[in-house]
Image (spheres, rainbow, N blue to C red):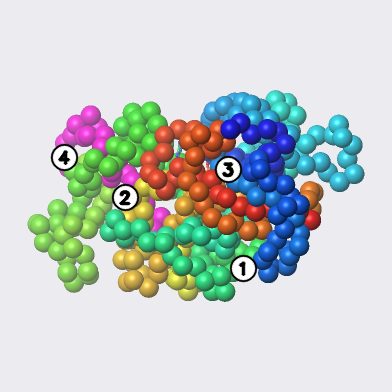
């Protein structure tokens, strides 16, 4: 079914260095606000409620014009809000976060007549993470030895935690409560590094192709292992097995080979392992610094990809001797956009407030609002829409 303008509301954007993420709400066509009042005890009793879905979409930032066309085709540019006291012909405000909210201000104004209402990126990441962890069932999960296990999050025991957002670059944020956080570290070796270096080294045409290649690769062809240095044996005294990577890409120095002599799949796997391992290790060190036991990894670098998650989880487990736990999020790449979405409420611009997500629903292929613009790699990242209720004030 095609959503009409009246059924869609509250577009929010996160315009990052690599990807633009969109979140918007569409209400179910058969519900009216008055016939569904709130039967729950969360302070919203008796208030009218709209039932509908949160939709997610993403575009490459380099193809921002595709994103603009999408917004235009769905008339999402009409779904923001006006400033209080503004006249009807004043520009519509769409909440936006990420560096692109600054960089592309003029483009959005010119092409869509939209004013981007800028929200701080870190505020949005944290708001998005807290929202998902508190409101969405089966959002967080652990990943070990190929096994995914959903984590039961105790709402009264959520804080503190470390949020590691792996986008183009990586931000590490200690979260102590709603709106209470500090960005304690970051690294420039992130998703952009994997995709940038990988593209140069393998000639892959897309991120997904590079990621897929890594699945068939063998990193031992290029990585120098402890066993390569120690004649096939472990270095037991310091806890290193012969198969531990001693030096990523280290074999390339002695092989007398050129780039063309290596298989792209092996290069991709070594690179993915190097970057995931490094992020896992820095994350663990920051968790240790602040005594944090739980680390939530987000950002589109992860892509629900088994080898990436496994490497990160193993790094955290190995370095913390099992004390700290790596967890992943189903809506990994949409934290910032969700945070921007929620800021509509914070600013009191409008009377729509999302308070409770009831359940998740898998992407319905007949639903025009939920396309992944680019191939998805796994069932974890097909941008599932979320059934939710929105309370009217
Ligand atoms: N289709 C894709 N095209 C490009 N990169 C992708 C794609 N899918 C996943 N990625 C990975 O996700 C990363 C971007 O993740 P994300 O969208 O979370 O960050 P960002 O907001 O663009 O970056 P930053 O926050 O640093 O500005 C890319 O650098 C790449 O590693
Ligand atoms: C600059 C941002 C915050 C933009 O999202 C991100 O790419 C990042 O955290 N980069 C790492 C920068 C650093 O701390 O070294």
Q: Nearer the viewer, mark 3 or mark 4?
A: 3
Q: Position of residue 318 (x, y in %)?
A: 31, 66
From the image, tell me which residue sits under label 3.
55
Q: Earlier in the sequence, mark 1 or mark 3?
A: 3
The C terminus sits in image quarter:
bottom right
Instruction: Look at the numbered disc 3 and give the secondary structure of its residue.
Output: strand
Q: CA distance from mark 1 to mark 2?
A: 31 Å
Part of the protein shown in magenta: 254-280
Whether residue 328 is visible to the viewer of this picture, yes or no, is: yes
Instruction: Look at the numbered disc 1 and give the secondary structure of its residue.
Output: strand
From the image, tell me which residue sits under label 4.
255
Q: Earlier in the sequence, mark 3 or mark 4?
A: 3
Crowd tier of the residue under label 2, counting other residues whose Cα lies within 10 Å: few below 14, some 14–19, many 20 or above: many
Disc assigned to residue 177: 1
Q: CA distance from mark 3 to mark 4?
A: 50 Å
Q: Is residue 332 above or below residue 326?
A: above
Residue that appears at 51% across and 60% down: 137
């Amino acid at each position: 079914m095609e959503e009409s303008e009246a059924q869609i509301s509250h577009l929010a954007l996160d315009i990052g260095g690599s990807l633009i993420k969109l979140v918007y709400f569409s209400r179910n066509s058969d519900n009216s606000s008055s016939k569904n009042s709130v039967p729950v005890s969360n302070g919203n009793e008796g208030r009218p409620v709209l039932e509908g879905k949160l939709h997610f979409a993403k575009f490459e930032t380099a193809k921002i014009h595709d994103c603009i066309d999408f917004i235009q085709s769905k008339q999402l540019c009409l779904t923001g809000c006006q400033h209080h006291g503004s006249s009807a012909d004043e520009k519509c405000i769409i909440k936006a976060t990420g560096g692109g909210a600054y960089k592309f201000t003029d483009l959005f104004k010119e092409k869509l007549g939209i004013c981007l209402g800028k929200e701080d990126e870190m505020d949005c990441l944290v708001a998005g993470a807290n929202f998902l962890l508190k409101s969405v069932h089966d959002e967080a999960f652990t990943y070990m030895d190929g096994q995914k296990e959903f984590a039961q999050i105790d709402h009264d025991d959520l804080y503190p935690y470390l949020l590691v957002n792996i986008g183009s670059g990586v931000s590490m944020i200690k979260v102590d409560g709603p709106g209470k956080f500090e960005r304690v570290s970051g690294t420039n070796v992130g998703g952009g590094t994997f995709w940038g270096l990988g593209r140069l080294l393998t000639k892959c045409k897309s991120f997904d192709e590079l990621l897929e290649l890594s699945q068939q690769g063998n990193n031992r062809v290029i990585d120098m292992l402890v066993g390569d240095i120690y004649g096939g044996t472990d270095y037991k005294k310091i806890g290193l097995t012969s198969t531990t990577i001693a030096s990523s890409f280290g074999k390339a120095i002695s092989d007398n080979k050129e780039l063309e002599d290596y298989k792209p799949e092996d290069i991709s796997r070594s690179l993915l392992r190097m970057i995931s391992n490094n992020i896992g290790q820095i994350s663990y060190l920051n968790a240790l610094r602040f005594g944090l036991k739980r680390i939530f990894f987000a950002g589109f670098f992860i892509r629900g990809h088994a080898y990436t998650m496994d490497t990160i989880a193993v790094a955290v487990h190995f370095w913390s001797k099992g004390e700290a736990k790596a967890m992943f999020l189903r809506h990994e790449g949409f934290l910032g956009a969700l945070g921007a979405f929620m800021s509509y409420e914070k600013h009191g611009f409008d009377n729509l407030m999302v308070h409770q997500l009831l359940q998740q629903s898998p992407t319905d292929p007949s639903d025009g609002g939920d396309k992944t613009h680019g191939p998805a790699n796994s069932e974890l990242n097909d941008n599932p829409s979320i059934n939710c209720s929105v309370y009217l004030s």
